[in-house]
Image (cartoon, rainbow, N blue to C red):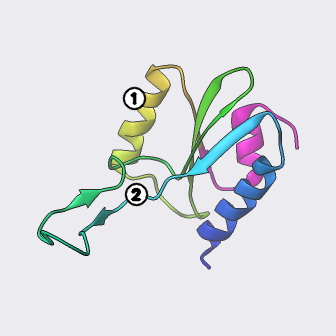
Amino acid sequence: MSSEAVLQQEIRLALGLRDDIMMFRINVGVFRPLEGDQRRVIRSAPEGTPDLLGVMSPGRAFAIEVKAPKGRQREAQAAWQGAWEKRGGIYVLARSLADVYKGLDITP
């Protein structure tokens, strides 16, 4: 597993233990159906969608983009962040679990 995948799992486990947070993983990609018209392309989520989406009490929506220590946010991810924050969502660019706690303004 890459360090990004390890960190994402660490975040999911830590936040999944809390009863004030509901969160899920978003897989972003392009796929072709196994049956029927295999030329057809299916996009699972809009480009730039972060790795994790959730809501925490009292109704605060958040998004977490997980990056390795030297990973860079892509242009589509930055655009998604801007649109999310413009509408009042919390966006966390996480390189550590501590980044998540700080970004969500919660304690472990």
Identify the residue at horizontal 66%, vertical 22% (top origin).
59
Horizontal placement of 3 versus 36: left or right? right
x and y percentages locating residue 43 in the rendered image: 28, 55
x and y percentages locating residue 49 in the rendered image: 42, 46
Farthest residue to the right: give it.
108
The quadrant of the rendering that contains the N terminus is bottom right
| SS category of the residue bearing label 1 | helix
Which region shows up in magenta?
93-108
| SS category of the residue bearing label 2 | loop
Whether 89 is drawn above or below 103: the answer is above
Farthest residue to the front: give it.
36
User: Which of pointers 1 and 2 lies earlier in the amino acid sequence?
Assistant: 2
Name the kind of residue labelled 2 in the image: Val
Horizontal placement of 34 versus 106: left or right? left
Identify the residue at horizontal 45%, vertical 52% (top origin).
73
22 or 76: nearer the viewer: 22
* Residue occupied by mark 1: 83
* Residue occupied by mark 2: 28
Whether 8 is drawn above or below 103: the answer is below
Mark 1: few/some/many CA within 10 Å (<14, 14-19, 20+): few
